[in-house]
Image (tube, grey):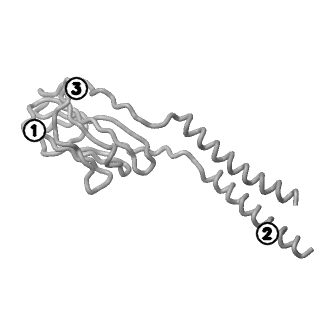
Amino acid sequence: MIAVRRVSGWCSRATLLLILIGLATVLTTGTASAHAFLERSDPEANAVIPSPSPAAQLWFTEPVEPKYSYAQLFDAKGTLINTSVSQVSADPKQITLSLPSDLAKGTYTIQYRNVSSADGHPNAGYVPFTIGGQADVVVPSPPATVTATTPPVWLNTLGRWLSLLGVTGAVGALLCWRWVI
C-alpha cells in the first residue's frame, strides 16, 4: 500500500508539472511580428545634398544579420551603380554603403534588404536622395523589388499546431496513465 501511494504521489506531481509546462507553453507562445524597419538614414530620404558623402548609412530598429543584409546604389533610371560591398557596422543595427566620390548631380536610390537577427524576418525598401540642388531632383524609377526567401505562412502555422498537438498528447498520455494505474 505504501508503494502505491509513492507512485501515486510521484505521478500526481509529474502530471501537475506537465500541465503547468503545457499551459506555460500555450500561453507564452505567440507570433513575433517584429522586423528590422528602417529607423533613419544618412543621407535622409528625399534629401538634397550639395556633394556626395563618402558613405551612406542606414540604421534599423533591430540588429540585422550581416550574411543576409545589404544595400546597393541605383541611379534615377534604376540602373545599378558599382560600389564596394555594403557591410554591417560595429553597431549591429547599422549598414554602411561606400559611395563613389565621382557621382554626378542627380537623383539616386539606395535599395536595402535586411534580415532581422532577432526574429529572422526579412525587410526591404529604398531611400532616394539627390546630389546637387532642387533643379537636379527627378522622380526616380524604383529598383526591381527583392523577393524574400522565407517559408510560407502555412508552414509556420502547421509547425505551431504540431507542437501544440505534441504537448497535448504528452499531457493526455500522462493523465491516461494515471487513470489506468
Q: Is residue 139 above or below residue 88?
A: above
Q: Which residue is mark 3?
A: 78
Instruction: Find out whether the residues at labels 2 and 1 contact each other: C-beta distance under 8 Å.
Output: no
Q: As shown in the figure, which amino acid type bears the numbered disc 2?
A: Trp
Let me know if residue 148 appears in the view: yes
- Mark 3: few, some, or many residues within 10 Å (few <14, many ≥20)? some
Task: Between residue 169 and residue 121, name the one nearer to us.
Answer: 169
Q: Which residue is mark 2?
A: 10
Q: Residue at x 23, y 41 (%)?
A: 44
Residue 126 falls in which quadrant of the image?
A: top left
Q: Residue at x 25, y 53 (%)?
A: 89
Label at residue 50? 1
Q: Is residue 82 left or right of residue 95?
A: left
> Residue 155, image x and y in percent?
55, 37
Q: Residue furthest right?
A: 1
Q: Earlier in the sequence, mark 3 or mark 1?
A: 1
Q: Residue at x 9, y 31 (%)?
A: 105
Helix, strand or loop under label 2: helix
- Mark 1: few, some, or many residues within 10 Å (few <14, many ≥20)? few
Q: Residue furthest bottom?
A: 2
Q: Quadrant of the C terminus?
A: bottom right
Q: As shown in the figure, which amino acid type bears the numbered disc 1?
A: Pro
